[in-house]
Image: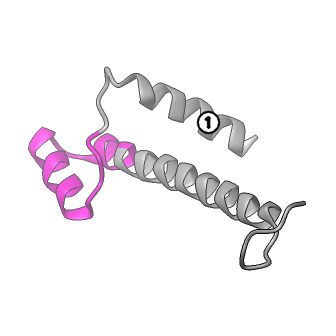
Amino acid sequence: MTQTRTGRTQGAAVGFADARAAADRAEIVQRHLAARTVADNSVDAADCHELLLMLGLPNPSVDDPSSHALDTSYQRATL
């Protein structure tokens, strides 16, 4: 491993960056699943919109192709 000016190895920096990226992806999946749960349990569209705004969650769109990818990621993670 090569060392940076501060004497730390680049491997540690890369490992931290990878862990941070994985945590960011996991947070996106969790927020999306939470939004879908709110949408599934809402009384109507207005209720759903209001709850999502209060919770600071994204509005899951039926036509959103990324939601299908997130569902697949979640299924792989829970198996």
Q: In this view, does 5 lie to the left or right of 71?
A: right
- Count of numbered marks: 1
Q: Is residue 40 left or right of residue 54?
A: right
Q: What element carries label 1?
A: helix
| Whole-percent x, y for residue 77 in the image | 70, 43
Question: Relative to the observer, which residue lies in front, 18 or 25?
Answer: 18
Looking at this view, name the residue that lies furthest to the left: 46
| Whole-percent x, y for residue 47 in the image | 14, 49
Q: What colour scheme was applied to this rendering of the protein?
A: one colour
Q: Quadrant of the C terminus?
A: top right
The residue wearing badge 1 is: 73
Q: In this view, does 1 lie to the left or right of 54?
A: right
| Whole-percent x, y for residue 52 in the image | 23, 53
Can you tell which quarter of the image residue 19 is in? bottom right
Can you tell which quarter of the image residue 71 is in? top right
Q: Check disc 1: other Cα within 10 Å, few if <14, some if 14-19, many if 20+.
A: some
Looking at this view, name the residue that lies furthest to the right: 1
Give the main secondary structure of the magenta stretch: helix
Can you tell which quarter of the image residue 53 is in? bottom left
Q: Which residue is drawn at 79% across and 78% down?
A: 7
* Magenta residue check for 54: yes
**Boundaries of the magenta span:** 36-59
Q: Which residue is drawn at 61% across and 36% down?
A: 73
Q: In this view, does 62 lie above or below 14?
A: above
Looking at this view, name the residue that lies furthest to the bottom: 6
Q: Which residue is drawn at 81% across and 61% down?
A: 11
Looking at this view, name the residue that lies furthest to the front: 5
> What is the three-letter code of the residue carrying label 1?
Ser
Q: Residue at x 75, y 69 (%)?
A: 4
* Magenta residue check for 66: no
Q: Is residue 72 above or below residue 15?
A: above
Q: In which quarter of the image is the N terminus?
A: bottom right
